[in-house]
């Protein structure tokens, strides 16, 4: 019987272990049978007009409210949960970006650029659910925590000169919002690795396996973003629910030898690509902890219109081949895998064309049959992405190291007419533009010098600017903040804002190591509150399970970031302090060395040393001869005589040295004082 119990006990342990793994993998279940924590992973692929490819990774983890304070999380990262609870964060967004989003070529009206196109460097903003007098202290502690969590210099934002408090121009603006940027922060794998550790499967399984470091960092643009939202618990004694979104947006250029050989003479041919050729890896299956794991391939409105035009010219048919069963054998392109579902956009404000979205489910793929989506272009295709109503640029004016001016240029993209419809030519039709700009304290802006030019004609500030909020900078205390609301006519072709400034002087300790490179002014934010970027697809049950498609259906304001300005300031000659320090240290070394040598020398030991030295120099033979002659003469042998220098003479010489060195030190101090 004992032998039979052992296999049964072993089998019971194995079953219990498998049950615990299953429970951990799919989250703990409450009394009502609902899952407490969920994780989703998705990837969006989108061709760009300039022969590049947009890859957008989207991961979402959620933890509902709970009554157990400090509970153990199965899927949700515990570090984020502790951060939200300790610093009372209601909403926060952190981004690391290298490069700048090309709004002219890659578009500015889609949900991706509106939400994921970020300024170079680090951008951090947070909304706190705490009293007003505690927000600044919570912000400083939050920056230090994020700095250690993501191995970055985010702690530099703790200074009051590095962050601001927007009132209403920033999209999530409120009285408890803090905003800060570090334009010069370098982005590397040290920031990506902690970001990946927040994922349940990290980069070992699922879609995150494609995150190959060399492939990502050789791209033209990449931005890793972390956005968390704290949902109210609804009752006291409960921890709030948290929704964590992690996105990685990368713009890559496929290197396809097949396309270059087949269409070497074509200038506008799109490069063919596959996941293995871009990232060097394939997807061998989904993450077992993920609720859904999908890959989407998006054809935007401009590309769909061009493909339909090419098909009508070739086939003379009205059939929409993009959604037919033989779409993979299209005259313009060919896909290497068959999609599981096809989504068509419901409506479009700019044109009658709608975007087409192909969905690929990763659940049916594994190590034996990995997923490797490929796209091969057959004919050259030229199209344009959707643009924002106005294209924003910013530049410096003036010369010299004393004064200058900042100019913000807004140029029409001919898209406002499509948004406004027939009312675009009406004189009463207005286009609202919000401008948010933060200027460091050492750039002293004269806000009264603000000028507005519409269609190259000067206009009164009161006629164009509907609302303005200005917070002047304070030296070494706070930066300058300018928030504007512009009301421009819908038929405007260009508008320019100019404002003058003076360059301040910094203390030598305030200069960075590369001060001669210049000082950065963070990017300005230009938003259009009357326009919202969204993509509404046909209603389907699968859309509710996809956080990425649900995000596309939300109304996100159209916004864009301008360039980072580089301002040269007057810098001192940093070699002069070095020379003064070296000369001073040399003089003090000589002074103290001579003084210690004179004070530490002992006369008796020197006399004894000289006697021993003289005794050693005498040979044995002369010594024996001298002893023999002394015995013959009947005299005693005398030892070697000491050197002529007496101890009194040595003592007086040492005293003179000390007096001379002390006199030189007094003269040196008197001369420099």
Image: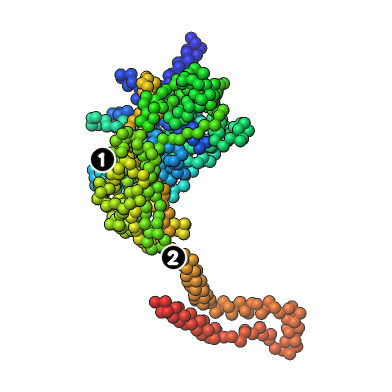
Q: Position of residue 30 (x, y in %)?
A: 32, 21
The picture quadrant where one finds residue 298 is top left
For marks 2 and 1, give the one nearer the viewer. Answer: 1
Dot 1 falls on a residue whose secondary structure is loop
Task: Please tell me which residue lies in front, 248 or 113.
Answer: 113
User: Label 1 neighbourhood size at 10 Å, few (<14), some (14-19), many (20+)?
Assistant: few
Picture residue at 36% right of the left edge, 46% below the top: 494
With respect to residue 517, does 209 lie above or below? above
Q: Position of residue 370 (x, y in %)?
A: 55, 24
C-alpha gap between disc 2 and disc 1 = 54 Å
Picture residue at 64% right of the left edge, 85% below the top: 641
- Residue 617 visible, this orientation: yes
Mark seen at residue 428: 1
Picture residue at 27% right of the left edge, 52% below the top: 460
Task: Please tell me which residue lies in front, 535 or 642.
Answer: 535
The picture quadrant where one finds residue 509 is bottom left
Picture residue at 49% right of the left edge, 43% below the top: 188
Q: Position of residue 181 (x, y in %)?
A: 38, 47
Does residue 387 appear to the left or right of 600 in the view shown? left
Label 2 belongs to which residue? 572
């Amino acid at each position: 019987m004992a032998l039979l119990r052992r296999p049964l006990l072993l089998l019971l342990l194995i079953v219990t272990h498998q049950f615990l793994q299953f429970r951990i993998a799919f989250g703990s279940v409450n009394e009502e049978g609902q899952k407490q924590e969920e994780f989703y992973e998705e990837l969006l692929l989108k061709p760009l007009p300039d022969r590049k490819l947009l890859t957008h990774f989207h991961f979402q983890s959620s933890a509902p409210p709970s009554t157990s304070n400090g509970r153990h999380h199965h899927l949700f990262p515990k570090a984020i949960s502790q951060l939200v609870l300790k610093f009372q964060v209601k909403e926060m967004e952190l981004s690391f970006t290298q490069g700048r989003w090309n709004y002219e070529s890659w578009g500015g009206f889609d949900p991706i650029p509106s939400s994921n196109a970020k300024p170079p460097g680090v951008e951090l903003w947070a909304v706190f659910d705490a009293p007003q007098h505690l927000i600044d202290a919570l912000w400083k502690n939050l920056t230090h925590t994020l700095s250690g969590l993501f191995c970055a210099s985010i702690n530099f934002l703790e200074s009051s000169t590095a962050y601001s408090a927007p009132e209403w121009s920033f999209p999530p603006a409120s009285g408890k919002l803090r905003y800060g940027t570090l334009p010069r922060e370098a982005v590397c794998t040290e920031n990506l690795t902690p970001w990946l550790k927040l994922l349940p499967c990290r980069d070992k399984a699922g879609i995150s396996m494609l995150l190959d470091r060399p492939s990502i960092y050789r791209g033209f643009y990449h931005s890793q973003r972390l956005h968390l939202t704290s949902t109210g618990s609804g009752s006291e004694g409960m921890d709030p629910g948290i929704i964590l979104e992690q996105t990685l947006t990368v713009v890559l250029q496929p290197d396809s030898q097949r396309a270059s050989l087949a269409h070497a003479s074509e200038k506008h041919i799109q490069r063919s690509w596959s996941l293995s050729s871009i990232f060097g890896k394939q997807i061998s299956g989904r993450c077992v902890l993920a609720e859904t794991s999908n890959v989407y391939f998006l054809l935007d409105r401009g590309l769909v219109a061009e493909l339909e035009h090419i098909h009508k010219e070739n086939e003379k048919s009205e059939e929409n081949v993009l959604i037919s069963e033989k779409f993979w054998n299209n005259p313009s392109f060919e896909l290497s895998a068959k999609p599981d579902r096809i989504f068509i956009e419901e409506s479009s404000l700019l044109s009658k064309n709608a975007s087409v979205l192909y969905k690929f489910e990763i659940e049916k793929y594994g190590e034996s049959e990995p997923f490797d989506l490929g796209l091969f272009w057959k004919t050259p295709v030229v199209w344009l992405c959707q643009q924002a109503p106005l294209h924003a640029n910013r530049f410096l004016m003036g010369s010299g190291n004393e004064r200058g001016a900042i100019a913000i240029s807004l140029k029409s993209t001919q898209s406002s007419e499509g948004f406004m419809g027939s009312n675009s030519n009406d004189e009463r039709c207005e286009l609202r533009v919000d401008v948010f700009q933060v200027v460091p304290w050492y750039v002293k802006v004269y806000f009264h010098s603000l000028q507005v030019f519409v269609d190259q004609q000067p206009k009164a500030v009161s006629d164009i600017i509907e609302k303005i909020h200005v917070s002047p900078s304070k030296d070494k205390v706070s930066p300058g903040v300018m928030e504007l609301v512009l009301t421009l006519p819908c038929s405007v072709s260009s508008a320019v804002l100019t404002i003058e400034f003076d360059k301040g002087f910094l203390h030598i300790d305030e200069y960075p190591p590369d001060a001669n490179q210049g000082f950065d002014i963070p990017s300005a934010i230009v938003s259009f509150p009357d326009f919202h970027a969204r993509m509404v697809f046909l209603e389907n049950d699968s859309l509710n399970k996809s956080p990425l498609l649900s995000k596309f259906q939300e109304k996100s304001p159209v916004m864009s970031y301008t360039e980072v300005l580089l301002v040269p300031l007057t810098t001192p000659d940093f070699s002069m302090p070095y020379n003064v320090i070296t000369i001073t240290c040399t003089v003090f070394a000589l002074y103290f060395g001579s003084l210690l040598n004179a004070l530490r020398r002992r006369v008796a030991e020197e006399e004894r040393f000289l006697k021993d030295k003289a005794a050693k120099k005498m040979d044995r033979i002369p010594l024996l001869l001298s002893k023999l002659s002394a015995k013959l003469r009947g005299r005693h042998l005398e030892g070697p005589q000491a050197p002529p220098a007496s101890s009194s003479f040595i003592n007086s010489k040492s005293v003179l040295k000390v007096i001379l060195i002390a006199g030189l030190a007094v003269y040196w101090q008197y001369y420099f004082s």
